[in-house]
Image (tube, rainbow, N blue to C red):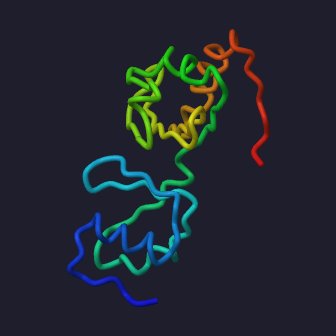
Amino acid sequence: MKAAPLDLLPEQAVEWLLTCRNLAALEWIFVGRWLFLDVAPEQLEDLSGLASFSDHSDGYAVFEIWGPKVRETLAKGVPIDLHPAVFTDTVAVTVIAHIGAIVWQTAPDRFSIAVFRSYAGSFWHWLSASAAEYGLTVKAPA
């Protein structure tokens, strides 16, 4: 693979990386900040002159939440509009029940939520209480 041209803007560099590496798990979270998911550090080496990277994978717990009442469940603690007409292909850095979180939609009624690992228990407590009226079920990761 050819090295990335050094005159690329960060967004162009990411586009180049996605094209060359076939990486699909990438989310824009803020100006100049991207969240790479399930990407080995070696896959990012070609961008070493264009960006800096830090591995936070051990610092976050990621919850996948889905079902017909997922938006109603999340609305109990998320202060942003998750309506399907508004929250599509979007990532939000927000709070859920006073816990810092990164929320992104992975399918029409499916969300991933990353919280700091030390808050995973508190988040789970909130989630299980919020989803109880909708018949919460827990499945082990595949």
Name of the residue lying farthest toward the front: 85
**Which residue sits at x=35%, y=77%?**
48
Specify whether 13 is left or right of 22.
Answer: left
Q: Residue at x 43, y 54 (%)?
A: 35
Instruction: Give residue 40's position: percent from left, percent from top.
Output: 56, 69
Seen in the image, is 24 located left or right of residue 86? right
In depth, the one of 52 and 138 nearer the eye is 138
> Can you tell which quarter of the image residue 60 is in?
top right
Q: Residue furthest top?
A: 133
Query: Residue 64: x, y in percent?
Result: 63, 38
Q: Residue at x 47, y 58 (%)?
A: 36
- Quarter of the image holding residue 98? top left
Residue 92 point in image, percent of width and height: 39, 37
Q: Residue at x 25, y 51 (%)?
A: 31
Compared with 35, 118 (above or below) is above
Question: On the picture, is 129 further left or further right than 40?
Answer: right
Looking at the image, residue 125 sits to the left or right of residue 45; the answer is right
Label count reads 0
Q: Is residue 27 above or below residue 48?
A: above
Residue 134, image x, y percentages = 69, 14
Would you identify the image quadrant in which residue 119 lies?
Answer: top right
